[in-house]
Image (spheres, helix red, strand yellow):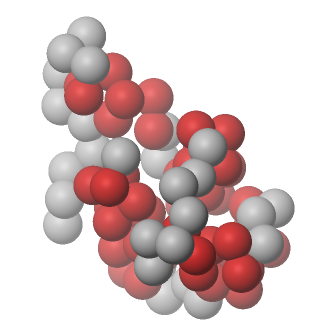
Amino acid sequence: MCKLIKNIKRERIHQKLTMEELSAKSGVSQKHISNIENAKVVPTVETLEKLARALGFDIGLYLKARSGRAGDGPKEK
């Protein structure tokens, strides 16, 4: 899951979104996003889905790849 969080942060930065902007798009508070990105909390799968959806990718592919049931998940940039 740590890699997924890093991918979410990397994608947020790549899209030039602030945490505040991602918060508005995802419905997850800016403080919670900060705590997730700084490894102060472990987010639920539902929260990760909200963040990923707001950034335009599906964490389902990542989770399936991690469990060995599908092909490659999101690529690191």
Measuring from the top left, give residue 29's x and y in whole percent: 78, 72
Asked if residue 13 lies left or right of residue 53, the reply is left
Q: Residue at x 71, y 81 (%)?
A: 31
Q: Residue at x 26, y 19 (%)?
A: 67
Question: Nearest the camera: 12 or 15?
Answer: 12
Q: Residue at x 35, y 46 (%)?
A: 1
Measuring from the top left, give residue 9's x and y in whole percent: 42, 72
Up/down of 19 relative to 71, above or below: below
- Does the rendering let one see residue 73? yes
- Does the rendering let one see residue 53? no
Question: Nearest the camera: 35 or 28?
Answer: 35
- Quadrant in the picture for residue 49: top right
Measuring from the top left, give residue 73's x and y in whole percent: 26, 36
Q: How many marks?
A: 0
Up/down of 65 relative to 15, above or below: above
Asked if residue 44 lies left or right of residue 77, the reply is right
The C terminus: image quadrant = bottom left
In the orientation shown, which residue stands out farthest toward the front? 40
Up/down of 67 relative to 60, above or below: above
- Quadrant in the picture for residue 8: bottom left
Asked if residue 12 lies left or right of residue 22, the reply is left
- Quadrant in the picture for residue 2: bottom left
Q: Residue at x 59, y 80 (%)?
A: 34
In the orientation shown, which residue stands out farthest toward the top? 69
Up/down of 24 relative to 4, above or below: below
